[in-house]
Amino acid sequence: MLRYHTVPVTAFQQNCSIVWCDETQAAAVIDPGGDLPQIQAEVARRGLKLEQIWLTHAHIDHAGGTGTLARELGLPIIGPHPGDQFWIDGLPQQSVHFGFPPAEPFAPTRWLHDGDTLQLGHSTVRVRHTPGHTPGHVVFFSPEAKRCFVGDVLFAGSIGRTDFPGGDYDTLIASITERLWPMGDDTVFIPGHGPESSFGRERRSNPFVGGT
């Protein structure tokens, strides 16, 4: 079974998630935006074997620590979708603009596409391409655990911003209704910021996508 623990990082309190297979202790870190010592301490405390970095998208608070962590631990960088290449290229400018520590450059080891799967120990995770917040945004879904790590696509009571370069409101709404909702009302999602919720709860009450 896939397990996870969320570590809020950076001044933006971005929900970096450590996920692992509870049979093998093989682990991945989703969106290591910064505060790497805090992330690594949590991995060590749980006795996990960190093997991969997964990225939902390449905004600085989600990807800022990726290059350094990959280099220091020799980890492959998985994701996001190629549509976010320009955000990766712009990480140094993002660092300056938002007052973050300098982001080390990186190139993904593997780009992700809609329908891809990832293996973590004995756990299989599905990838869906969910553009709208950024063109290359992806989410990670574990049908077994009924959990989805959605980055900045959807929040409890809100949705991701679409006013950044490459964002598009209608595309984001379509990503939510056509690619997240079919995962099931009982699926709990872990957003990039704020508390967890379920797709069913958001379908009923979210002012942006409720009733869809």
Image (tube, rainbow, N blue to C red):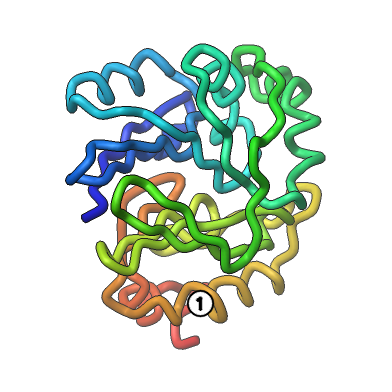
> With respect to residue 130, does 110 lie above or below?
above
The quarter of the displayed image where residue 104 is located = top right
Q: Quadrant of the N terminus?
A: bottom left
Q: Where is residue 98 in the image (x, y as percent from the top left)?
A: 66, 24
Task: Estimate how packed mark 1 is, as few (under 14), some (14 to 19) or many (20 or more) residues with alpha carbons within 10 Å.
Answer: some
The residue tagged 1 is: 209
* Type of the residue with mark 1: Val
Q: Where is residue 189 in the image (x, y as percent from the top left)?
A: 36, 60
Report the front residue among 63 and 155: 63
Q: Where is residue 74 in the image (x, y as percent from the top left)?
A: 52, 19
Q: In this view, does 64 lie to the left or right of 189?
A: right
Q: How many tags in the picture?
A: 1
Residue extending farthest bottom: 211
Residue plotted at (23% across, 48% down): 3
Residue plotted at (64% across, 43% down): 110
Report the front residue among 181 and 204: 181
Residue plotted at (18% across, 21% down): 45
Q: Position of residue 133 (x, y in %)?
A: 65, 56
Report the front residue among 200 and 44: 44
Residue plotted at (33% across, 78% down): 200
Q: Is mark 1 on a helix, strand or loop?
A: loop
